[in-house]
Image (cartoon, rainbow, N blue to C red):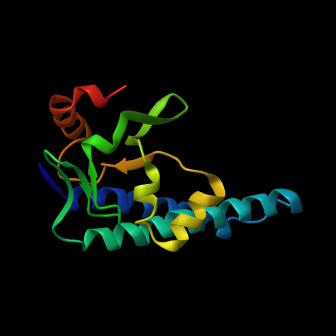
Amino acid sequence: MKYYNSKKKILRAWLICAMFIGMGSLIFVIPDSGSAFRDLVDKCIAWVTICFFGSTLILLTLQAFRSGEQLEINDQGIIDYRTSLGLIQWDDIKELWVKAYTARSIETARVLCVELKNPETYIAKLPARARVIIKTFGYRPIVLSLSTLNSSFDEIVGYIKSKHPEKFK
């Protein structure tokens, strides 16, 4: 199966980021409270919000202009064209699982985690800066975000489970 970007999903995420940037910017026009500490905290929150969602907005914009396949799942394995890992063969995959992120008991995002039997093979394919981060913080499972693809998360995971149920936790 081949999966492509969904312009509609990217636009929705882009609008949410723009909304948060706007809310962060509003903090700068609200009159000072009189408390220097509170004003400093408010300004820090505003800058963090603007920087985080601003960088996400840039990445979403770049992703919107990427054409062609973004993810392919076939008899050989998983190919994520958004990364430099290349083909992750089924024999190299130790385990797959779904991780859900929540905020105040509301599910905010789900990702597909891939644990490799021999991660060194794939780490060697990554750019130098990524290898430095992995060396510094240690190896973590590969995390595949499926949120901006043209099929739903459940459809993609369901397809993988139908082909390779033994790989799932």
* Residue 158 located left or right of residue 48: left
Q: Residue at x 31, y 64 (%)?
A: 82
Could you tell me if residue 121 is visible in this image? Answer: yes
Q: Is residue 56 left or right of residue 104?
A: left
Q: Is residue 39 left or right of residue 143?
A: right
Residue 12, percent across and down?
31, 56
**111 shown above or below 53:** above
Q: Residue at x 29, y 60 (%)?
A: 10
Q: Is residue 44 left or right of residue 40?
A: left
Frontmost residue, 88 versus 68: 88
Residue occupying image coordinates x 42% and y 72%: 58
Up/down of 100 relative to 54, above or below: above
The vertical placement of 98 against 128, above or below, is above
Residue 72 place in picture, x, y as percent: 18, 53
Residue sitting at x 64%, y 54%:
137
Q: Quadrant of residue 64?
A: bottom left
